[in-house]
Amino acid sequence: MGRRTGTTADGGTGKGTFSDEKSIGMYTSCKNRGTAWDVLKFATGKEQDGKLLQATGQMPMRAGLTSAYPDYFASRKDYGIFAEQAEHTVEAPNVPNSVEIWQTFRDRQTAGSVSTVR
């Protein structure tokens, strides 16, 4: 099986790709903020992220992912290569009409068109 890093239309590399991060938050109306904060820190801690990775293969959005869980990625070489690319993710920009823009982009890509969305 071959593998390579992704490139852009101009042949460049090292330009990020969009993540699909799932985030959590706490409402300002929360009555037990201290307890809620402790739960959030626990649930998103390194140990719990490792358990999620082990159980599901879902990679947490964490800096130094492959060095944080070296045993996991040592036994899954191809997955480790994919995980290294996670260091180059960026979040999709939040712009006016973003839902329409991204839906148009998705529709054009699934239809096989490679035109630019403006």
Image (cartoon, rainbow, N blue to C red):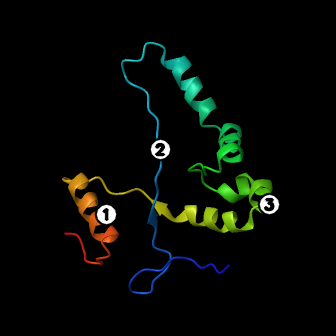
**Residue visible at 55% across and 18% down in the picture:** 35
- Residue type at numbered disc 2: Lys
Residue 97 image offset from top left, x and y in percent: 19, 53
Q: Position of residue 82 (x, y in %)?
A: 61, 66
Question: Quarter-wise, where is residue 100 in the image?
Answer: bottom left
Residue 106 vertical placement versus 60 (above, below): below
Residue 106: give its label.
1
The residue labelled by disc 2 is 22
Badge 3 vs badge 1, beta-carbon distance below 8 Å? no
Closest to the observer: 113 or 79?
113
Task: Count neighbours of disc 1 (C-alpha within 10 A) and say few if under 14, some if 14 to 19, many if 20 or more.
Answer: some
Secondary structure of the residue carrying tag 3 is loop
Measure how far apart labels 1 and 2 are at the Cα level: 20 Å
Give the mark nearer the N terminus: 3 vs 2.
Answer: 2
x, y percentage for residue 34? 53, 18
- The image shows a total of numbered marks equal to 3
Q: CA distance from mark 3 to mark 1?
A: 34 Å
Observer-side mark, 1 or 2, equals 1
- Judge by depth and name the residue closer to the eye, 106 or 89: 106
Toward which corner of the image does residue 95 lie, by quadrant?
A: bottom left
Residue 98 rendering spot, x and y as whole percentages: 24, 54
Is the residue 98 above or below the residue 42 in the image? Answer: below
Q: Is residue 18 above or below residue 112?
A: above
The residue that mark 3 highlights is: 75
Look at the image and tell me in which quarter the N terminus lies.
Answer: bottom right
Q: Earlier in the sequence, mark 1 or mark 2?
A: 2
Cα–Cα span, label 3 and label 2: 26 Å
First of labels 3, 1 by sequence position: 3
